[in-house]
Image (cartoon, rainbow, N blue to C red):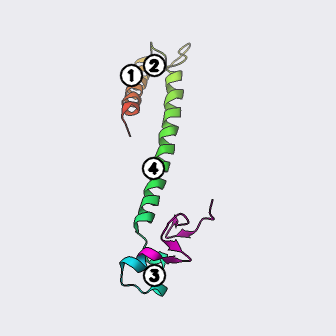
Amino acid sequence: MAEPIIINGVDVSGCIHYKNQTCIANYLFTNIPFSEAKCNISPNCHYKQLKRKEQKCEKYEACINDIKIINKDLLNDLCDNCGWYNTDGCDLDEDYVCESLIKIKQIINEVGNESV
């Protein structure tokens, strides 16, 4: 794996147009002289945009995985009767607790069934 080269907040080490601080695409597709066709003058080139989107997707994937774990833990704690794992000696208002937890469970199940 190549050493990361961060330019404009993105690792450009995998870009086929990058060579020694120069962006070959800047030189080929613009009127910029080769000596001035630096990678950092194009903060929103296609490669950098793609890498930023990939970073966002990875971040969202991590969030979704966290939610799935929380959902699994919550569903394991809920019972079928009242919505709470252990109701023995519970002094909370059971109707309120049950309604709220069951509503939360329904929302989580709806969101969990949506495709991302």
Q: Is residue 64 magenta?
A: no
Of mark 4 and mark 2, the one earlier in the sequence is 4
Nearer the viewer's eye, disc 1 or disc 3?
Answer: 3
| Label ID, residue 37 | 3
- Say few, some or many: other residues with alpha carbon within 10 Å of mark 3 (under 14 / 14 to 19 / 20 or more): many
Q: Residues within 10 Å of mark 2 (few under 14, many from 20)?
A: many
- Residue at figure coordinates x 45%, y 50% from the top left: 57
Percent x, y of residue 22: 50, 78
Q: Are marks 1 and 2 in contact (CB under 8 Å)?
A: yes
Which is the main secondary structure of the residues drawn in magenta?
A: loop
Q: Nearer the viewer, residue 4 or 86?
A: 4
* In-image side of 115 versus 72 (left or right): left
Q: Helix, strand or loop at disc 2?
A: loop
Q: Earlier in the sequence, mark 4 or mark 3?
A: 3
Q: Earlier in the sequence, mark 2 or mark 3?
A: 3
To which residue does mark 1 refer? 99
| Disc nearest the viewer among 4 and 3 | 3
| Residue at image point 42% right, 80% down | 27
Q: Earlier in the sequence, mark 1 or mark 3?
A: 3
Q: CA distance from mark 1 to mark 3?
A: 63 Å
Q: Return the mark for residue 83.
A: 2
Give x and y (percent) for residue 20: 56, 77
Point out the stretch of residues depicted in magenta.
Answer: 1-25
- Mark 4–mark 3 Cα distance, whole angstroms, equals 30 Å
